[in-house]
Image (cartoon, rainbow, N blue to C red):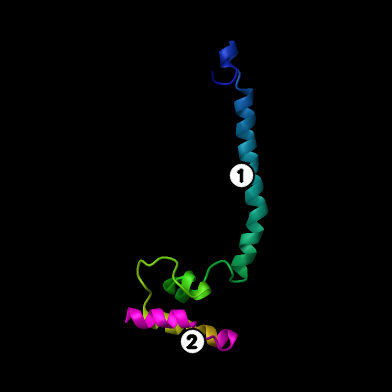
Amino acid sequence: WFYSWGNGSADANLLLAQFCSVVWICGWVFFVMTPFFLALNALGMFRVDALEEEVGLDISHHRGAAYDLSAPKKEDVEELMEVRASRHGKVEVPKEVADAAKEAD
């Protein structure tokens, strides 16, 4: 039966306690995490830039595609490598990525 209704009692104290617990946890998470999200947003670390989003984080961060669905445009990958080279010094394209780009052409 549903809570204590099987015993002939129609109170929903346990249901109310669980509902209050869920509301409390949601509120706690909101108030604790909101400052972190606002700080990340203010520092510009909340999202990646548009070029990395277009190319894909697998290629820009891990130097390879996770899924072989469709490759990014070669121009976008080259532009990303140029941008990263200017920000972080010289960044060389790994041999596997260069070979995969040549095969895609």
Instruction: Judge whether 85 appears above or below 32 on screen.
Output: below
Amino acid identity at mark 1: Cys
Picture quadrant of residue 17 = top right
Instruction: Judge whether 5 appears above or below 38 on screen.
Output: above
Residue at x 53% of width, y 83% of height: 84
Q: Secondary structure at mark 2?
A: helix
Q: Residue furthest left?
A: 105
The magenta stretch is: 86-105
Spatial separation of the CA atoms under disc 1 and disc 2: 43 Å
Residue at x 52% of width, y 72% of height: 62
Neighbor class of circle 1 (other Cα within 10 Å; few <14, some 14-19, many 20+) is few
Tag 1 near tag 2, CB within 8 Å: no
Residue 36 in view (yes/no): yes
Q: Main secondary structure of the magenta part?
A: helix
From the viewer's perspective, tell me whether residue 99 is left or right of residue 3: left
From the viewer's perspective, tell me whether residue 22 is left or right of residue 103: right
Horizontal and vertical percent position of residue 69: 35, 66
Asked whether 104 falls inside the magenta stretch, the response is yes
Picture quadrant of residue 19 = top right
Horizontal and vertical percent position of residue 97: 44, 79
Picture quadrant of residue 5 = top right
Amino acid identity at mark 2: Glu
Frontmost residue, 63 versus 43: 63
Give the mark nearest the N terminus, 1 or 2.
Answer: 1
Residue that mark 2 sits on: 82
Q: Secondary structure at mark 1?
A: helix
Residue that mark 1 sits on: 26
